Amino acid sequence: MGRGVVVGLGGVFLASPGVRRRWADVSALAPLATRLRESMLLASLPRAEAVAAAMHALGGQPTRLIGQPGALAAAGAWSAALGVSVGVGDGSLVALLGSALVEATIDEALAAGKRVGVACGTDGGEPVEPPPGGIWIDDPWAGEGTRGVLGAGVLVAAGLAGVDVGAALRGADAMREACEAPVAENPAWSLARALRGLAQENRIDVIAHAAGEPALAGFAAWASRAQSCLLAASSPTFPARPLPIHMLEADEEWLRALGTGRDRVLLVWETGTGPLPRAVHDGGPTRLRVQLPGLDAEALGGAFFLWLRALELLAALEDRGR
């Protein structure tokens, strides 16, 4: 990524000589990497122009966002990091289709004279007819708490709350380009290979997502949930993965609890602008560190894409269906 995301694997190599010995051997991954080069999980990102047009059609004021709880939590991952309130305005309404409750709320909003944006995928490839007085937002990921964080519905609500959507999509697109690099130079492959290697060599497969600074607590919570959802499928070659947790890295109590087992790895999300990173210490959990190039929309867009792509690759390495 042009602004310099850093995937720090020093803790992995310290904890696992086996992973270090195998790291340079990427020849066996070539067929899989070729097959996964064109991702179906993140096939296309929304267009900034389409998001801006929907924002204008909804009146340009902070909007209320409704959807299933996971989708709303994904929107909240933008809020905490950027200091904005996504989806809690009293103007128009953006509805992420996917539950009966959402449809009932649409009817109530229309009856109250609110402008409504309905976010969903196409109907058999055809545009969706919005309700009278509403607009349609083309978003095949609406209602998801995983990919939905980069979906048009969430981005419209985020843009109306003050998030620079153009910068967010530029960051995601730059990370997409970085994640098309060969395996040895690819940040998503680095994360996936490190996690797979720790599980294979050391039986370290309980992942705790840590926010290196409070502003990234929402991001760590989203990353934990996305991992749970995308790796939920069973694998014929790998046992069920324990559900991850999320925490602040400064939480001494959680760190002590994690340090009581040898099967845990701490994945720390940070920017380097918050409190100084903790040193890797003897007896503590193995740490991987991902340093974002800043705490802004562009950096977050890239980080969201990076983790989704890494999870897709990890699912393939573990032979888990989607």
Image (cartoon, rainbow, N blue to C red):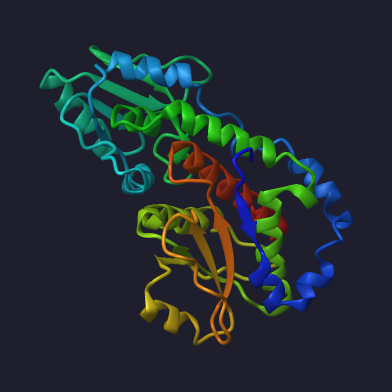
Q: Is residue 300 left or right of residue 174?
A: left
Q: From where the camera sits, is residue 40 visible?
A: no
| Residue 95 locus on image (x, y percent) | 30, 30
Q: Is residue 290 left or right of residue 89?
A: right
Q: Looking at the image, which residue is at 67% across and 64% down?
A: 9
| Residue 89 locus on image (x, y percent) | 19, 32
| Residue 194 locus on image (x, y percent) | 69, 64
Q: Looking at the image, which residue is at 35% across and 59% down?
A: 214
| Residue 221 locus on image (x, y percent) | 40, 57
Q: Looking at the image, which residue is at 53% across and 18% down?
A: 125
Residue in the foreground of this view, choosing between 202 and 240: 202
Residue in the foreground of this view, choosing between 1 and 228: 1
Q: Is residue 315 left or right of residue 116?
A: right
Residue in the foreground of this view, choosing between 233 and 257: 257
Relative to 119, residue 29 above or below: below
Quarter of the view holding residue 153: top left
Residue in the foreground of this view, choosing between 90 and 93: 90
